[in-house]
Amino acid sequence: MSEAPPDPATIRMRGFTQRAPVEAVWDWLAEQVTPLGPETVPVARAHGRILAQELRAPEPVPPFRRAAMDGYALHGEETVGASAYNPLPFRLLGEAFPGSPFPGSVPKGSCVRIMTGAPVPEGADAVLPAEHAQESGNRVEVSDTVPSRKHVGPVGEDIEEGEVLLREGHRLRPQDVGLIASLGRDQAAVVGRPRVRIVVTGNELAGPGTERAPAQIFDANTDMLKGLLARDGGVLEAAHRVGDDAEAIRERLTADGADVVIVTGGSSVGAEDHAPALLAECGELAFHGVAMRPSAPTGIGRLGAAPVFLLPGNPVSCLAGHELFAGRAVRLCAGRDPDFPNASIRVPLTRKIVSALGRLDYCRVRLGSEGAEPLAVSGASILSSTTRADGFVLVPPDSEGFPPGTEVTVRLYEPAWSPEDPA
Amino acid sequence: MSEAPPDPATIRMRGFTQRAPVEAVWDWLAEQVTPLGPETVPVARAHGRILAQELRAPEPVPPFRRAAMDGYALHGEETVGASAYNPLPFRLLGEAFPGSPFPGSVPKGSCVRIMTGAPVPEGADAVLPAEHAQESGNRVEVSDTVPSRKHVGPVGEDIEEGEVLLREGHRLRPQDVGLIASLGRDQAAVVGRPRVRIVVTGNELAGPGTERAPAQIFDANTDMLKGLLARDGGVLEAAHRVGDDAEAIRERLTADGADVVIVTGGSSVGAEDHAPALLAECGELAFHGVAMRPSAPTGIGRLGAAPVFLLPGNPVSCLAGHELFAGRAVRLCAGRDPDFPNASIRVPLTRKIVSALGRLDYCRVRLGSEGAEPLAVSGASILSSTTRADGFVLVPPDSEGFPPGTEVTVRLYEPAWSPEDPA
């Protein structure tokens, strides 16, 4: 458990007296946040979801011997000696199509025309490919040998009855969804999707698409966060934009219905920074101030079972705070791997990164043919520093930075998908 | 342009006489398939979409000088000499909050209490951090120096007026969406999403969730393809499941409303393989038979402007055919990079891969601590070969395979997101 954070009332306008290490916050999240319970969804909507229970095969797939080629089902041993110079005659009894099997069995000296996917009729044990046979009337001349079992998929070739096919906790890829469907299931039990509430605060914020007052700026965080939370497996519960009004924030913060709450703006120690005191009063403010840059004035706590994140209003801080903390909680609730979802590459730095001991730096970089170039930025409000960037490098607290040429891990910024239920 | 493919009627039950190289199909797709026209969507739904036109800044961001710290706005040069031993007095005129600026200007000897994000009042040119000041009544004792311009974000600090912020064709990441919102836009012009029709054919197929007849198997392809096409930026137009009935297939194939059509099953040269002849008759069958394994009996062509893909019904072939061809067309229509969307890694092979000269092999591999292990499989119908796999390796047509220890590119299978509009 964490040490008690400083009382937010005592640090107003005074700065943080201590900042929690990022790892301490991660440990707390790992203890506090657990996957949601299972829910049943149509299999076609299970893509990307986390399987809530092990999947076993209720029957073998295929449930019958299946032709793997178009051709003729027959007794393979009877084709021994057949060639273009010595074609062997077989009596053609009928046809077997996928879904429409030949109703009888195949005695010696006979064959059945068969299509890929059709059940191989009783008696036959091989499929001679069509190009090695010449059909005329009810007679087939066979011009090649085919050994027993050739081009016949056995029962359970794909999946044996009772086999464990997918483990609990597995994230479903398209072929996994296909596999569930191939067992005849049209539903899947998956970990629920956390309902995420966004509460963007600040008198200075105007909604995109509205007129802004001269001292206002447009809110970038709501729309950015919608994509991030969808990427992390969450679903938007509600998005609110409120002024720096403690009662309005309290109402949005404490309403039921969210599994994760993200508040942006007013997270620091200024006179209008209401959120930390409100969270401490209504729930638990486990951390206030984190040893990182940007996003140091971040608060983390909970209200009932829901983890709550108080992120700075500056868009870059908000992005970093989501990537490091809020997104992690969404992924934990969704049953996913909590670690960064970004793909990563190892490349050399083209210029040095300077960092301070004792804090984690979230450093935006641009990729070029020579490696990763740190983007020089003067403040956390520079959203274009992230839109010019291809990814970020984390400088750990025990490092003063990296000289040019150091090979570093770049976590790549990637597109999120369109959220399903935007507000 | 491609050579004329063989008449499907003449190759029925005879096998393919020629198979097109995969690269020839890719070249044809690159010539034939162009991005859809633009559409306007709410900015919160633009995540992952392709920007249809360059984005320029209509005004600077921020549009005013902005405080970067909580503290006191004042004339920086007036703090020269201030220290804890020599605090300098300033007259406190009022407050500036984000969205609620101080209405006047700041004459010499005065200061204004200011919060991060608030407009810096006229006259003031620096913000003294709160911790270096002691307030009492309308008097502030300043105990540190702050140079001019310190902690003041200038007009256009983030974005200059007229600056090109995002290029046409850029795929929008969360911070890009935030950037668009920060300009006050609540809509974005993006490349349209291709409407993809899935037509799954075969008498042998039963729908998941239904009872299957003894000779039937359950359809895995519909639900698998829904995830794949959503991953590639498409939206489902319709999903049909029909028997091996030429007229029923013709009706589904030729109906208006799809930008891309995927037909699975009946793509080869058997008596029940109607799709190639139908496509040749109603549109253009540009390729029939591709030099690859699995998925060799694939057809590619068009109906009007819509590219049409005839994929084998075996789920692994269907998956490979989508990854190599149909998905590529969906991505081209969606304005995306047509190449494989999978993340990739370079690792050594733990066992050899054997391939035939002249064809491309799509080889499923599992990753372990030693590298990539090729999964031994006996047929294209083995869907579990892909669910046990972590990715695939492509063996090019000019290679007979790779010995153990060869470093290969593994393209990773990754989850698709839940499609937005499942049928």
Image (tube, coloured by chain):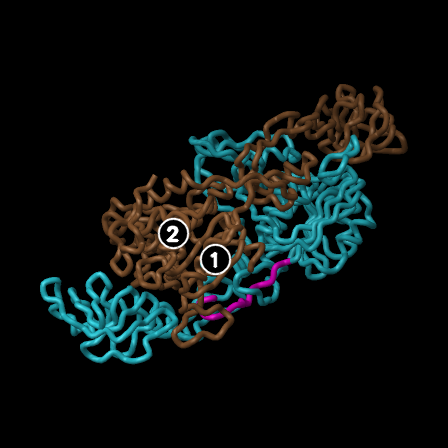
Chain colours: A cyan, B brown
Residue B238 in the image: x percent, y percent? 53, 57
Q: What residue type is labelled 2?
A: Glu
Q: In the rendering, at what x and y percent does residue A307 appear? A: 67, 56
Q: How far apart are marks 2 and 1 (CA)?
A: 14 Å
Residue B281, label in figure: 2
Q: Does the magenta stretch include residue A190?
A: yes
Question: Which callout, 2 or 1, points at the residue further toward the start of the chain?
Answer: 1
Foreground residue among B421 and A361: B421
- The magenta-colored residue range is A181-194
Say which residue appears at 60% left-offset and 41% top-offset: B39
Q: Residues within 10 Å of mark 2 (few under 14, many from 20)?
A: few
The answer to whether B117 appears left or right of B350 in the picture is right
Up the image or down, A136 lies above or below A229; here it is: below
The residue under label 1 is B252
The amino acid type found where label 1 is placed reads Arg
Which sits in the foreground, A385 or B320?
B320
Residue drawn at x 30%, y 58% is B269
